[in-house]
Image (cartoon, rainbow, N blue to C red):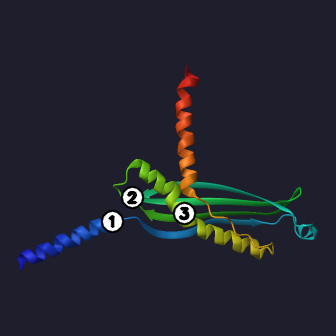
């Protein structure tokens, strides 16, 4: 009987350790949001030939042991000719528990690509809703391949590191 209880206690401790050593989403939230339509109502009278510019930034902040806040910031600027039709900014954030046993490169990939992949649909929906409430035509941002963006960033850093000694010589 005592052996059975000990086995159950060991199993419970093992399950608790596995649960704390798994990726999990603690919370997803809008951290900041802004919508401006500075040239209304005159912009509505212009022929609608918009130019869309999307800027993106990903940042992270360690909150606790193995707990990180990741923020995906999107800025969407739509111009018609020289005039700004609208400017929409959304900072979509999430709090994530990340396993402690991840290697540094895997942790960097998780923070810069995996977590933003989770946040992007929420940010896209927030932007779409704001643009729609401004009575502009529907805006659905195309999906972003954060893995490819991260790989490109790593490659650029490696090239810069290789060029650095040449510049010092």
The image quadrant that residue 132 belongs to is bottom right
Mark 2 or mark 1, which is nearer the start of the sequence?
1
Residue 4 location in percent, x, y? 10, 77
Q: Residue at x 61, y 60 (%)?
A: 144
Left or right: residue 19 versus residue 74 is: left
Crowding around mark 2 (Cα neighbors within 10 Å: few <14, some 14 to 19, many 20+) is: some
Mark 3 or mark 1, which is nearer the start of the sequence?
1
Q: CA distance from mark 1 to mark 2?
A: 9 Å
Residue 75 location in percent, x, y? 70, 59
Q: Quadrant of the N terminus?
A: bottom left
Q: Residue at x 56, y 22 (%)?
A: 168
Q: Residue at x 48, y 53 (%)?
A: 109
The image quadrant that residue 143 belongs to is bottom right
* Of the two numbered discs 1 and 3 in the rendering, the one whose residue sits closer to the viewer: 3
Number of the label disc, if any, that sits on residue 20: 1
Q: Which residue is mark 2?
A: 66
Q: CA distance from mark 1 to mark 3?
A: 22 Å
Left or right: residue 21 versus residue 106 is: left
Q: Are marks 2 and 3 in contact (CB under 8 Å)?
A: no
Q: Secondary structure at mark 1?
A: helix
* Of the two numbered discs 2 and 3 in the rendering, the one whose residue sits closer to the viewer: 3
Mark 3 or mark 2, which is nearer the start of the sequence?
2
Q: Quadrant of the C terminus?
A: top right
Q: Secondary structure at mark 3?
A: helix
Number of the label disc, if any, that sits on residue 129: none
Q: Residue at the top extreme?
A: 169
Crowding around mark 1 (Cα neighbors within 10 Å: few <14, some 14 to 19, many 20+) is: some
Q: Which residue is mark 3?
A: 117
């Amino acid at each position: 009987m005592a052996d059975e209880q000990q086995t159950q206690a060991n199993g419970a401790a093992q399950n608790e350790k596995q649960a704390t050593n798994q990726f999990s989403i603690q919370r997803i939230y809008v951290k900041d949001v802004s919508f401006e339509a500075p040239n209304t109502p005159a912009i509505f009278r212009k022929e609608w030939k918009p130019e869309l510019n999307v800027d993106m930034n990903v940042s992270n902040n360690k909150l606790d042991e193995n707990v990180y806040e990741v923020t995906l910031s999107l800025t969407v600027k739509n111009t018609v000719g020289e005039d700004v039709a609208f400017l929409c900014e959304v900072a979509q954030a999430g709090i994530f528990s990340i396993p402690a046993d991840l290697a540094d490169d895997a942790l960097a990939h998780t923070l810069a690509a995996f977590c933003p992949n989770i946040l992007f649909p929420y940010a896209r929906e927030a932007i779409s809703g704001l643009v729609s409430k401004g009575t502009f035509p529907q805006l659905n941002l195309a999906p972003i391949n954060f893995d490819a963006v991260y790989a490109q960033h790593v490659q650029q850093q490696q090239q810069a590191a290789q060029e650095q000694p040449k510049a010092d010589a």
